[in-house]
Amino acid sequence: MSVYGALLARPGARALACACALGWLSFGGLVLVIVLAAERATGSFPTAGATAAAFTAASASLAPLRGRLVDRRGGPALLALALLHALALTAFAAAAGVVVMPGAPADGGMPAAGAGGGGAVLAAGGDAGVAGVGVLAAGGDAGVAGAPTAALIVFAALAGACAPPLVAAARALWPRVAGPSLVRTAHALNALLGDLGGVAGPALAALLTTVAAPAVAPALLALGPLAGALLLARAASALPRPAPSPTDPAVGGDGGDLCHPGVAERHLDDRGPGEGGPCGAGGRRGVLRGNRGMQVLLAGDLLAGTLLGAAELLAPARAEAAGTPQLAALPLALLAAGSAAGALWSGRSRRAGAPAARALGGLALLATALPAGLLASLLSPTTASPHAAGLLATPLGASGNPLAPLCLAFPLAGVGYGLFTVALLELLDRLVPARNAVEALTWLTTAQGAGLALGTLLGGLAAG
């Protein structure tokens, strides 16, 4: 049996892997469906961009607070956030002009939700009237291009503010599910699912907007994190109750109240002044203050995010310059494939080495290969080809093919990123107490999100 088979055979592992997959898949396509729904409702891409920015900014800025809440309150807090997130996206869908009444006429481009099936119920959590969303009836395109911009932005921001830290909470459970011998394999599997979600998420978003309607897709996609939170609770329930440790008797090893909220509840009144509770995030100090190792990880993740942000903008820009925008996804797909290969190797190899060495080596490979490929592409004389086949027929080493340096460099950069990601998660286990694990990972995702934004800006300037 392979190490991955042995991992998935452990109690709770399959439910936990499914929760991770749902989280990566849903969040990987959510920004795209928000953009498409907002553009459909308002007829304005600038408005759609502002709406997506409101979601992203609220999600990133409040991620550490949501992580701290889940560290303190465990599974119930995660489920509550998932439910609020689903309700906010349902409200967003309603504001965008969702058709949900059976038999509503469809005389425009948007199909009636009741066509062929008797109507769609879009109320997450079972109550269609929660948060004033109600059931919105609109005939065909009624309400489209007339949706209030402020409502779309507010509901998108609320959805971002309540986005459940599903992947971070799952990562906090992996060490207990996998055990010491398979913890690196578990982190590699998590990284692999992230790579697959980054590719499949936008594809799912496009499918939902085509099959259902742009405005319906956000509400449908919100069901993923809700189901993932339930699966995470199931995985946690399959684990044995941890034994108390001498250094943290209230928590009992790692996992904290995410796995057993009753442990935390019995000790909530025992915390001292300034403490965050037995499963709190280090009291009011959080996980960053005085933790030099954690600060170094944040700096590395910020650098990785900056490089990836530049790549995500420059790859389509160079494809456009070559006259083949349909090939824009090719270098990015090769980057994702390389990352998946690096993560798989990290999880299977017995000679992977120390996580600190792998983190440095992976980041060095990423920081060398990616800028080299981007610079070579920018300096390459462009011979525009009207056909994708013509560009692909150009030898990779020949001038006039601006995608050739990217297709050569991005797989290597991806391998480096895969190595770096798995090692980063291993180091996180060593640097941060398990009771702070969710908040710690949300800080890393916030740092990488800031890097992605900075890299996108720099890439835009370079594309000129």
Image (tube, rainbow, N blue to C red):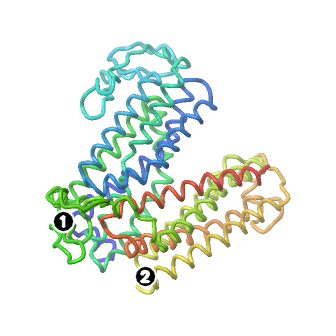
399 in relation to 416, above or below: above
Identify the residue shown where x is 24% and y is 31%. 126
The residue identified by callout 2 is 349
**Separation of disc 2 and disc 1 at Cα?**
27 Å
Q: Nearer the viewer, residue 188 or 171?
A: 171
Q: How many numbered circles does the render carry?
A: 2
Residue 171 showing in the rendered view: no
219 in relation to 377, above or below: above
The residue identified by callout 1 is 239
Q: Nearer the viewer, residue 463 or 139?
A: 463
Q: Nearer the viewer, residue 321 or 129?
A: 129
Q: Which mark is residue 209?
A: none
Name the side, left or right, on which 317 lies relative to 133: right
The percent position of residue 24, horizontal first and vertical second, equals 42, 53
Q: Earlier in the sequence, mark 2 or mark 1?
A: 1
The mark lying in front, picked from 2 and 1, is: 1
Q: Nearer the viewer, residue 103 or 226?
A: 226
The percent position of residue 358, horizontal first and vertical second, equals 51, 79
- The amino acid pointed to by label 1 is Leu
The percent position of residue 355, horizontal first and vertical second, equals 46, 79
Residue 103 showing in the rendered view: yes
Q: Are marks 2 and 1 in contact (CB under 8 Å)?
A: no
**Residue 254 occupies quadrant:** bottom left
- The amino acid pointed to by label 2 is Ser
Tell me the crowding category of disc 2: few under 14, some 14 to 19, or many 20 or more residues within 10 angstroms, Cα based: few
The percent position of residue 384, horizontal first and vertical second, equals 82, 50
Identify the residue shown where x is 23% and y is 61%. 271
Q: Residue lying furthest front in this view?
A: 273
